[in-house]
């Protein structure tokens, strides 16, 4: 069942459009992620869905009922039964943790009371019920905000960058707890984030947004392994970029030959290779090549290498590689590399 | 026609939407008009028929009014600047005995309305007063021709009285500005070879300039507003002139024309204030803060600082308050006999009502502006809070004129339609006085409601909405509890200002209706200050409340700590 449906939604704030015709559907029980850099319009979409912004163009419906359209239909946020978790958590400073959590509960039933008791215990905030928000740590505030959003039993949960306010060490565990709670609740959730790793970890489906448009929709694996364009491919961190001309539907590069399907001969192609797509070979293989080590650094569970490939007339091209484990060859040494074609993408420029 | 209900529904929705927006918009529009009505009626009167009174005013008294008012502003401005800035610098950056006490005690004269210290000083400094009597006894002088003694009831006297009671505005803002400044910039100035005093003149003072300009413009607005002091001292300023033309020459048009000229003075002050507020941005030259160094003073410097800080407190508060207290002690029975409780009740009721209404309207405007985010509404509410700059005399003329027109209109309509004369319903009623208070003090409540609402993030609002509260519920459960403290403080300030108010009350009040302020004014004019001392002391005592609030507020206001 489609729970939230947005149809050709456009939006602007006294300037150029920030949302330029977005259609999306959130299905029951699904965890959907809007991934994109800041300013791509993803938070605006959340606010539109929650009813905090009025629809200017397009239609938004909740459970097949129109809640906002361009004709002035606007169901106010308090009538939508949609939970929203804010980036800054937006806990009410004058209320205790318990009062914050119960703020949206209109009628305290025994089931609801039971749910709050269980959930706060599970999230490790049961002892903090009498405390005021300013005395809590960031992680505790995040959990209170999550429980508060879920307590009125909303139809859908919207999360706006829910982990960006936390420090890196805390983030992973809070992320896991949040996902587990949302999954156990069975509620449909839509999260906004600029962190691709977070999106991959949390969601069933990722919608990549760029300049107010959805540029790709798919599973985390699809987004990672078959990016729709160079922008999506570049989202997951720095990539190696090469530029070559297509000949016989292929591009030949010093690092190997790549298929250029759907491109005509003579077209300029952009080849993107993820750093983890550079594989170190023990021996020189037919498809690989030998490159000079400029620099090698240990990152912990992986090693980062800066390599220089000498390509005759084309000069020297620099390559970044990310190798699992400890691999720290001396500077100036030569190593043999090969490109993992699953992590290399060819796009027209 | 299946389409028809759908269409109707859609139109209904549109109507609803318009109504939602219209509620705040319409409210702000009405308030804006109401508040602007005195100003508009003054402009209307100015342009209307004036029976040549204007040319008469120009040829006789106008020059006098302008020169006297300018001299008064110059005098009070300089006095307040010197007292305010020097004491602020001393208590902020120097260390000397009693500094902690001076920090808040320097605000005490704020509790003293200038007309009250004018009454007190006249009482003790006039020919028959204790000071001159003592001098005559000591030196054997017989008559005024035997010696020279400064005349307190003069322009100079008015300047001294107002400087003594108004300098705390400059002190307060200058002190806040010095506290905000980073010591780093002063230390850089020292390492570049400037002495402490040179650093003050070349770095600290220029950085604090916007704040000082704001403080000074507030002082000058109060100076223009004053009626009690200039009336008592017979100093011919605009305010005195407006009442003279209005009540003695019986020409409200002439009074309105004088008021318009006075308003141009106010516009200049407003522009200066606006400019200074805009320019405050540069005061934060750096974000690094360190503890203030605290130059420890010794020797003659220490004595000088002590005297400089003690003098304004002594003359502006301690001495007049002590004198009033002693008078009240000896003459309280007379005051009580003169129906003191009735006047106290009147003052409390009037100020309380004004505070409540000003608060409700201020909150309504501030919340409406925030909800709608509409620039039109914002502009309307800014306009509605302009009353604080309008001198009481100007407002009084405007209110009298517009209420009079309303009364006359209603009366003739009722007579024409029902053969019934309603007479003067609003003019000279409590409604008129309360309205005057609200217009003049609305800026206080609106400003503080807006400032405290701005501290609530929009996401908190969004959270409350998505958790099931509508706009009113959000106001009730989120905003009101969070801003309660500061709006109560604002309400108190309006209340206290109402207790002190004289220029509007004196002409707008109903016949035979006395407040503490008008009672004191009347008795002091009849040289019976002792008999009214208890009432004066009561006004001063309520005036202490904002002093306490302010002194609590400026503690811990320093950023970075």
Image (spheres, coloured by chain):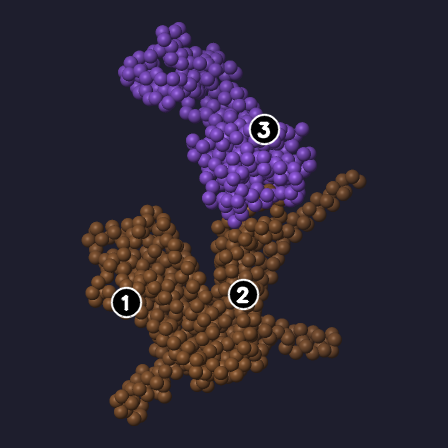
Chain colours: A purple, B brown
Tell me whether marks 2 and 3 sit on the same chain: no
Q: Residue furthest front?
A: A127
Is residue B254 among the parts visible in the rendering?
Answer: no
Residue at image mark 3: A183
Dot 1 lies on which element?
A: helix
Where is mark 2, residue-wise? B355
Q: Position of residue B446 (x, y in %)?
A: 51, 59
Task: Please report, as a chain letter, where disc 3 is located.
Answer: A
Viewer-closest of B185 and A152 = A152
Q: Same chain, marks 3 and 1? A: no
- Please give the name of the residue rendered at 29% of the width and 62% of the height, measured from the top-left corner: B90
Q: Chain under label 1?
A: B
Which residue is located at x 38 percent, y 17 percent? A325
Look at 42% across and 58% down and name the residue there.
Answer: B553
Task: Label 2, secondary structure: give it.
Answer: helix
Q: Which tag is nearer the camera, tag 1 or tag 2?
A: 1
Residue at screen point 54% across, 77% down: B341
Q: Nearer the viewer, residue B498 or A100?
A: A100
- Residue marked by disc 1: B306
Contact between labelled residues 2 and 1, with CB atoms less than 8 Å apart = no
Query: Farthest residue in the right direction?
Result: B1
Of marks 2 and 3, the one in the foreground = 3
Image side of residue B221 versus residue B373, left or right: left
Of all chains, the one bearing label 2 is B
């Amino acid at each position: 069942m489609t729970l939230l449906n947005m149809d050709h939604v456009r939006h602007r704030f006294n300037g150029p459009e920030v949302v330029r015709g977005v259609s999306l559907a959130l299905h029951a029980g699904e965890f959907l992620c809007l991934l994109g850099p800041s300013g791509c319009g993803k938070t605006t979409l959340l606010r539109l869905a929650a009813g905090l912004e009025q629809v200017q163009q397009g239609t938004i419906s909740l459970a097949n009922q129109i809640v906002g359209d361009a004709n002035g239909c606007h169901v106010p946020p308090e009538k939508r039964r949609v939970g929203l978790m804010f980036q800054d958590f937006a806990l009410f400073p004058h209320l205790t943790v318990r009062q914050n959590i119960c703020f949206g509960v209109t009628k305290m039933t025994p089931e609801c009371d039971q749910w709050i008791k269980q959930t706060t215990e599970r999230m490790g905030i049961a002892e903090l019920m009498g405390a005021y928000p300013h005395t809590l740590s960031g992680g505790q505030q995040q959990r209170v905000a999550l429980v508060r959003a879920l307590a009125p039993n909303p139809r859908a949960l919207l999360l706006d960058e829910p982990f960006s306010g936390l420090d890196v060490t805390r983030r992973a565990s809070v992320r896991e707890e949040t996902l587990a709670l949302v999954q156990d609740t069975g509620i449909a959730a839509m999260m906004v984030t600029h962190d691709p790793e977070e999106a991959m970890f949390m969601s069933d489906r990722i919608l990549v947004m760029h300049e107010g448009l959805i540029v790709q929709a798919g599973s985390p694996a699809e987004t990672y392994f078959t990016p729709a364009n160079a922008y999506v491919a570049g989202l997951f961190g720095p990539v190696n970029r090469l530029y070559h001309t297509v000949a016989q539907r292929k591009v030949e590069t010093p690092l190997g030959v790549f298929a250029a399907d759907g491109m005509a001969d003579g077209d300029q192609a952009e080849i993107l290779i993820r750093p983890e797509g550079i594989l170190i070979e023990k021996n020189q293989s037919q498809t690989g090549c030998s490159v000079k080590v400029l620099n090698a650094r240990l990152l912990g569970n992986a090693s980062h290498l800066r390599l220089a490939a000498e390509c005759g007339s084309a000069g020297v091209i620099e390559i970044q590689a990310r190798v699992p484990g400890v691999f720290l060859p001396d500077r100036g040494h030569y190593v043999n590399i090969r490109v993992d074609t699953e992590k290399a993408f060819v796009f027209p420029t | 026609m299946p389409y028809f209900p759908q269409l109707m529904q859609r139109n209904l929705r549109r109507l609803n939407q318009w109504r939602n927006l219209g509620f705040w918009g319409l409210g702000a529009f009405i308030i804006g008009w109401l508040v602007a009505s005195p100003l508009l009626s003054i402009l209307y009167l100015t342009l209307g028929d004036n029976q040549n009174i204007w040319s008469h005013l120009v040829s006789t008294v106008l020059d006098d009014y302008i020169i006297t008012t300018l001299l008064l502003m110059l005098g009070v401005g300089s006095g307040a600047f010197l007292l305010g800035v020097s004491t602020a610098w001393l208590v902020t950056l120097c260390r000397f005995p009693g500094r902690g006490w001076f920090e808040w005690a320097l605000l005490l004269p704020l509790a003293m309305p200038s007309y009250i210290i004018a009454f007190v000083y006249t009482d003790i400094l006039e020919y028959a007063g204790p000071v001159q009597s003592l001098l005559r006894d000591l030196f054997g002088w017989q008559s005024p021709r035997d010696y020279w003694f400064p005349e307190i009831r003069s322009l100079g006297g008015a300047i001294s009285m107002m400087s003594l009671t108004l300098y705390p505005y400059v002190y307060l803002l200058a002190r806040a500005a010095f506290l905000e400044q980073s010591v780093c910039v002063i230390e850089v100035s020292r390492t570049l070879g400037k002495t402490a005093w040179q650093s003050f003149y070349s770095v600290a003072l220029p950085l604090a300039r916007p704040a000082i300009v704001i403080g000074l413009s507030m002082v000058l607005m109060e100076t223009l507003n004053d009626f009690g002091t200039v009336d008592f001292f017979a100093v011919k300023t605009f305010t005195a002139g407006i009442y003279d033309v209005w009540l003695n020459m019986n020409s409200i048009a002439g009074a309105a024309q004088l008021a318009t000229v006075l308003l141009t003075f106010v516009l200049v002050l407003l522009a200066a204030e606006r400019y200074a507020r805009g320019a405050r941005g540069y005061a934060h030259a750096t974000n690094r803060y360190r503890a203030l160094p605290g130059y420890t003073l010794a020797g003659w410097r220490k004595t000088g600082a002590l005297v400089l800080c003690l003098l304004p407190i002594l003359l502006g508060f301690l001495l007049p308050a002590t004198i009033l207290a002693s008078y009240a002690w000896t003459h309280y029975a007379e005051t009580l006999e003169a129906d003191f409780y009735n006047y106290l009740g009147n003052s409390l009721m009037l100020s309380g009502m004004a505070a409540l209404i000003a608060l409700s309207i201020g909150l309504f405007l501030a919340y409406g502006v925030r909800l709608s985010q509409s620039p039109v509404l914002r502009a309307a509410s800014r306009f509605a809070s302009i009353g604080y700059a309008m001198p009481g005399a100007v407002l009084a003329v405007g209110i009298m004129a517009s209420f009079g027109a309303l009364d006359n209109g209603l009366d003739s309509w009722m007579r024409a339609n029902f053969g019934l004369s309603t007479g003067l319903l609003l003019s000279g009623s409590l409604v008129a006085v309360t309205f005057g208070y609200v217009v003049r003090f609305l800026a206080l409540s609106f400003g503080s409601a807006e400032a405290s609402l701005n501290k609530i993030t929009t996401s908190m609002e969004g959270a409350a909405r998505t958790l099931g509260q509508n706009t009113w519920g959000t106001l009730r459960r989120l905003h009101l509890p969070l801003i309660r403290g500061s709006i109560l403080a604002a309400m108190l300030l309006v209340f206290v200002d109402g207790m002190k108010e004289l220029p509007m009350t004196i002409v707008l009040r109903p016949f035979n209706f006395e407040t503490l302020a008008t009672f004191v004014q009347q008795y002091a004019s009849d040289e019976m200050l002792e008999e009214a001392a208890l009432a004066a002391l009561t006004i001063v005592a309520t005036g202490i409340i904002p002093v306490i609030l302010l002194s609590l507020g400026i503690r811990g206001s320093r950023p970075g700590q």
